[in-house]
Image (tube, rainbow, N blue to C red):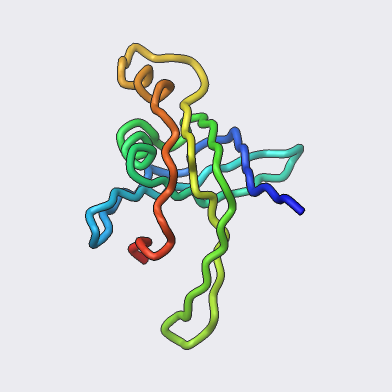
Amino acid sequence: MASKNLVILIGNVTGDPDARTTPNGKKVTTFSVATNYKDTAEFHNIVAWEKQAEVAENYLTKGKQVYIEGRLQTRQWTDKNENKRYTTEIIAYQILMLGAKSDKPREEAVETAAPTKPEEEDDIPW
């Protein structure tokens, strides 16, 4: 039977993105997005690679409304106290800024950024 792992979010960036480069030279940016349903807020960890990482790093700031399309991924690691830890993230394929346009031309470039295929899990720098 076929399956599909697809996430689509529209929400607000909760803080400025954190950009890094892997030991292999690949760009990765992480940030969080809040979505609201009635009186409940949900917070989603987003991971963007290469071109989408550049979009996130250069154009997203706290409070910006954003459209995210990607897939869910759960990672496991052992912390310094030897406890197994888990986190679920959204690997972003596409990032688009939403909301009112400002006078800044850089926002127009974000809307035309092509989706990119995320890198393999072995290249994650954490």
Quadrant where the image shows the N terminus? bottom right
Identify whether 40 is placed above or below 60: below
Q: Nearer the viewer, residue 77 or 1?
A: 1
Please identify the quarter of the rendering in which residue 85 is found. bottom right
Looking at the rendering, which quadrant does residue 15 occupy?
top left
Question: In this view of the protein, which residue sits in the foreground, 106 or 41?
Answer: 106
Q: Position of residue 102 (x, y in %)?
A: 39, 14
Q: What residue is shown at x 31% (from left), y 16% (from top)? A: 104
Q: Is residue 22 left or right of residue 38?
A: left
Residue at 61%, 37% in the rendered image: 9
Measured along the vertical axis of the image, is residue 122 above or below residue 66?
A: below
As drawn, which residue projects farthest toward the bottom? 82
Write the residue at 31% across / 38% down: 54
The C terminus lies in which quarter of the figure? Answer: bottom left
Q: Name the residue at the top extreme.
A: 103
Q: Is residue 108 above or below residue 11?
A: above
> 63 left or right of 29?
right
What residue occupies the far front of the structure in this picture? Answer: 1
In the rendered image, residue 8, in percent from the top left (x then y), is placed at 62, 37
* Residue at figure coordinates x 39%, y 35% from the top left: 61
